[in-house]
Image (cartoon, coloured by chain):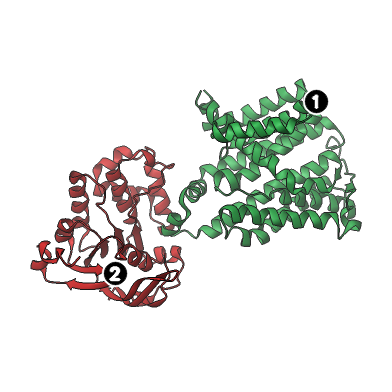
Chain colours: A green, B red
Amino acid sequence: MFAKVEKSPVLTLTFIAVGFLIFGYATSLAKITDFIIFCIFVLGFDLVYGHMGQLSFGHMLYYGAGAYGAAMFANFVHPDPFLAMAVGISVGAILALVLGSVVVKTTGACFALLNLALNEVGAFMVLVPFPEWTGGEDGLSLFFSSYGFIDFGDRVFRFYFCLGSLLLVVFLIVLLVRSPYGLLLKAIKENEIRVRFLGYNTYVYKLITFVISGAVAAFAGSLSSINLFYTNPSLMDPTRNVEVIFAALMGGAGNVIGAVIGGTAFMTISNYLASYLIRWEMFLGVALLIFAFRFRKGIWGYARQI
Amino acid sequence: MLLEVTNLDVHYGHAKVIHDLSMHLKEGELVCVVGRNGAGKTTLLKTIGGFIQPSAGSVSFMGESIIGTPLHRVALKGIKYVFQDKRVFGDLTVRENIELAAHPTKENLSDAIKKVVAIHPKMEKLLDSKAKGLSGGERQILLIGRALIGDPKLLLIDEPTEGLAAKIIGEIVDILLEMKGRIPMVVVEQNLFTVSRLADRIYVMREGAFSNEITDAATIKQPHCYEEDL
């Protein structure tokens, strides 16, 4: 049954849209907007991890770059939310291009740790040396222009805007992974050297994937700034990389619906379980161990077999 | 000369694996390299294929040095490698494996599929099967077929019959014989009976160097004549 959902892009989008509409109206639109933004971030991260097979411990850097790019533009240049988003995405993509040109030459632990190190540098840069621009530890409070019904001050509009953004990202990633390019990514994940023997310059394809992944993460970051009306260093905190890795593993890495389910599952646990358990992170750790050792395919990986 | 290897030295760290080795290959020729395990046969093939950089010597292909050339450029020059381990892209279907090989050579997918099916019609039924489900022989056929996509100018084939059943070995040898004369090949092989059927010339390799070169067709047909050279 669920396998059919995955095969048809229309069913995939409907499944996600209906799921979030029910969840949003049954709980809280504001909270579910956060969930949706996080899912966009997971989708971006999973391009590099699940689809290309490289684990990054530093994708918060691109999330934060998007958040700060949008926030600084809105704060110092113009409070237009769409321009701010465009700037946020561009900052993330350019940063991913520059850093990715070095990072994608590495693999395995080196790739993971190099990303983490760069994330640490980014977090330091927004926190310490330029407080007059980044707001330092306090971050930046933001204001965005509204145009008629386009009012980001309205939580219902924010919810639908973010849901539309998620569906757009899902659609584009589905197109990407089903194209010959997606085939190539699968092959690179399986055996990069053999792909090079076929005549592909895998460096270029890996870099392009890294840039797209960074841009999607930055898009999520810029949405976060607009949704929260502020930006602070926690949006670039390297320790939060664990969250996106947990989410991708829980949902099922290398699958678009898996990324969305993983993002939602992680946010549900971290938002709701915290009300009942003081050390809810311990539960998350146990859950990760169970997924890592017993359910490698993640929630969606098993659900699709039903 | 299509391929010319001159005074090749290859090191793994401090260990010299190939020393002062020279060989050549003419258009349309099928050369077999034989030798015991650890003699350096695969290392030689990987060096020609651009996967390992030699510490000294030269490898020229169609008159151009290919040392230091990135792997993908070596492949685009028309040198195709069929690995010993018979690893295909298991998560992809047979059709997708073929599509992946066709794209960089700009060969039409249907033409590429025809080429693979032509060497073994059984492959047509397997086109939509996941490659990880193929048998060893089917994988080898897919790998050889995939290497034929884009009109290769040189095939490097490492132990094509290793670990295969006798019947499949026969099929693989027939495929290689059918290709012989059209596509130049360097084949590393330990099965001397197979070598005797395939080779135009034989290089016997021992401890990183060629100990003998057999060019006489009558001698090639009698494996016992060079068995003790190994």
Please tell me whether residue A135 is drawn above or below residue A267 in the rendered image: below
Identify the secondary structure beneath mark 2: loop
Please state if A14 lies on the left or on the right of B172 as rendered.
right
Please tell me whether residue A284 is drawn above or below residue B4 in the rendered image: above
Q: Amino acid at mark 1?
A: Ser
Residue hosting label 1: A275
In this rendered view, identify the residue nearer to me: A276 or B134. A276
Q: Amino acid at mark 2?
A: Glu
Identify the secondary structure beneath mark 1: helix
Please tell me whether residue B49 is drawn above or below residue A2 in the rendered image: below
Q: Outermost residue toward the left?
A: B218
Q: Is residue A257 visible?
A: no
Please give the label number shown on residue A68: none
Q: Residues within 10 Å of mark 2 (few under 14, many from 20)?
A: some
Residue hosting label 2: B207
Instruction: Say if labels 1 and 2 share a chain.
Output: no
Q: Do labels 1 and 2 touch, CB within 8 Å?
A: no
List x then y, in percent, for residue B42: 33, 62
List x then y, in percent, for residue B154: 31, 65
List x then y, in percent, for residue A28: 80, 25
